[in-house]
Amino acid sequence: MNKKTYLPKTEAIERKWHLIDADGKVLGRLAVQVADLLRGKKKVIYIDSVDCGDFVVVTNAAKMTLTGKKLDQKTYFTYSGYPGGAKLKPYSVLMQEAPEKALFAAVKGMLPKNKLADKQLKRLKVFRDDKHEHSAQFAKSK
């Protein structure tokens, strides 16, 4: 019984493009869906040590929602590395100024904390409204 584990070659991985409309969707649930597509968890060839995910384009990020009192209570935290360099921004302000950052931070937190996460995050494209420059990829796939 000499069974070998299948390990996909990086050249053989076929990357698809997914377009997700965030209009009316909850931030956390959308982030889970996007993170799974970036990692390739729905693919048959999925192995957590190999980057086999797809490209994801999210539009209408400004129309995402947060449930409960998160809009008032949740804060976005950044730290420059210097003493006193911590910046806290409430999500009510963040969702008005840069909703793309809110989704990006949520997806980043759901990816593994290793070198693969950087490669996977480069395939995430988030846009505030429904205009984006990746329409050629979706026209090609149809």
Image (cartoon, helix red, strand yellow):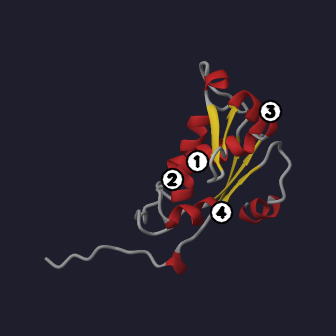
Residue 111 numbered mark, or none:
2
Above or below, comparing residue 11 to residue 110 in the picture:
below
Horizontal side of 111 relative to 142 (left or right) equals left
Measure the C-alpha gap from mark 1 to mark 2. 7 Å
Label 3 amino acid?
Gln
Distance from label 1 to label 3 (Cα)? Answer: 19 Å
Q: In the rendering, at what x and y percent does residue 43 appear? A: 47, 59
Q: Do residues under tags 1 and 2 come within 8 Å of each other at their CB atoms?
A: yes
Q: Which type of secondary structure does the marked residue at label 1 adopt?
A: helix
Query: Callout 2, which amino acid?
Result: Leu
Q: Secondary structure at mark 3?
A: helix
Tell me, for residue 107, which label it has, or none.
1
The one nearer the camera, 91 or 126, is 91
The residue at the far top in this view is: 69
Local secondary structure at mark 4: loop
Residue at image x 40%, y 65%?
47
Amino acid bearing label 1:
Val
- Point 13% across, 76% down: residue: 1
Residue at the (71%, 33%) spot, across then down: 64
Name which of mark 2 and mark 4 comes first in the sequence: 2
Nearer the observer: mark 1 or 3; the answer is: 3
